[in-house]
Structure formats: C-alpha cells, structure tokens
Image (cartoon, rainbow, N blue to C red):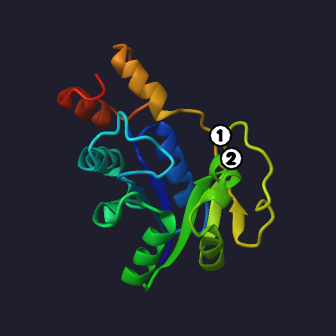
C-alpha cells in the first residue's frame, strides 16, 4: 500500500485537518492516510497542549467512519521532542511492505530547511504538499520528490478553536460533533 503520513498536534483535530486528510486519500494515489499524533512538536510550545492520549482519542472519534483514514500513536513511543526523520525511519522499518509519503502544508515547506535532516527526508520520501494561505515560493517547489495536490485552502486554526472554547463561543462546524461532545465532557480548553 501507498500511505500518506499526516503529522500534527491535533489540539484539537478540526474540519481543516479532516478535509486535507480526506482530500489526500480520495484524490491522489494514496491508499490510506495515517494521522500521526505528535506528543511534542519541536517548533511549538507545550502551553495548552492536551495530553497525547486525549488528542489521539479525539482523532480516533473524528475519523471512525472513514476506512481510508487511520490514527497512529507511534510517536508516543519515541524520544521527545519528535523529529519527523526519526519517525519516518521507524515507520519505514516497522512497515517495510508499504511505501510512505509525507503530507505537509505549503507553509511548512517554506521552513523545510530548518527540519532535522530535511535532505534525508527528501532523499527517501516524497512530499505531497497542499496549499496554505499566504504561502510563498520555496526552493523545493519544483523538486522531483515534491508533488503539489489541489486541495481546499483551509484557514482554520486549533488556536482559534481553543480561544472560542475559552470564551464559551460555539465551535460548531469547526470540529466534528463527536469531538465537541468529548471536549465538553472532559472540560478541555476552559
């Protein structure tokens, strides 16, 4: 199988994440998309980050009815912070029968040179890149391992959603109903 790996904090998972994951699964040559819940992104602060198991559970609930999407806790068992190259190496070793592709937004491609061993990522893996608002051209735009995927441009942020929850404002239509119920039940982000 050819599998796309979509990394994220998913704090919380929202419609933007789901639209991108589903678009990748339905409009490209990928058989599945695995959503990799990152316990700690080396480029993000830990503040307001829910426990990884809670974020994993929210992703699981959000994608439960889609056979082409899976959630993975593989980074929970790796040293922190999580570096993409290390996770990719472990996944490729553990699931050698599959071909893996890294899914990323064009905003991340702009800062790709800051990633640990970005040259090795490009040597061994293809990148499927989706558009993000206000993205600029990069040195990798025409790289043979970079494939641009036409996907809806989503400008929804988990930060905005957390602020809405904190202010007791509705997040309806931004987050799946099952995830809203989970957030309310656990009193997250309040």
Q: Which mark is residue 73?
A: none
Is residue 145 left or right of 24 when viewed as pictured? right
How far from the left and from the top, in percent, is residue 68?
A: 43, 61
At x 29%, y 46%, the residue is 61
Residue 190, compared with residue 18, is above or below; it is above
How far from the left and from the top, in percent, is residue 29?
A: 59, 69
Q: Are marks 1 and 2 in contact (CB under 8 Å)?
A: yes
**Mark nearer the N terminus (1 vs 2):** 2
At x 38%, y 14%, the residue is 169
Q: Quadrant of residue 13?
A: top left
Q: Quadrant of residue 136?
A: top right
Is residue 138 left or right of 45 when viewed as pictured? right
Q: How far apart, in angstroms, are the residues tagged by discs 1 and 2?
A: 6 Å
Q: Which mark is residue 131?
A: 2
Q: Which residue is mark 1?
A: 153
Number of numbered discs on residues: 2
Is residue 98 left or right of 136 when viewed as pictured? left
Residue 163 visible in the snapshot: yes
At x 52%, y 45%, the residue is 19
């Amino acid at each position: 199988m050819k599998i796309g790996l979509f990394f994220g904090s998913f704090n919380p998972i929202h419609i933007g994440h789901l639209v991108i994951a589903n678009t990748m699964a339905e409009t490209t040559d990928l058989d599945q998309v695995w959503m990799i819940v990152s316990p700690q992104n080396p480029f993000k602060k830990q503040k307001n980050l829910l426990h990884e198991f809670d974020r994993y559970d929210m992703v699981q609930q959000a994608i439960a009815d889609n056979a082409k999407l899976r959630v993975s806790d593989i980074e929970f068992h790796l040293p922190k912070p999580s570096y993409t190259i290390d996770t990719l190496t472990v996944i490729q070793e553990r699931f050698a029968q599959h071909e893996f592709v890294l899914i990323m937004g064009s905003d991340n491609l702009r800062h790709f040179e800051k990633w640990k061993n970005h040259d090795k990522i490009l040597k061994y893996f293809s990148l499927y890149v989706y558009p993000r608002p206000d993205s600029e051209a990069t040195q990798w735009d025409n790289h043979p391992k970079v494939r641009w995927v036409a996907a809806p441009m989503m400008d929804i942020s988990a930060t905005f959603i957390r602020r809405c929850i904190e202010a007791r404002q509705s997040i309806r239509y931004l987050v799946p109903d099952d995830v809203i119920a989970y957030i309310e039940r656990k009193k997250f982000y309040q």
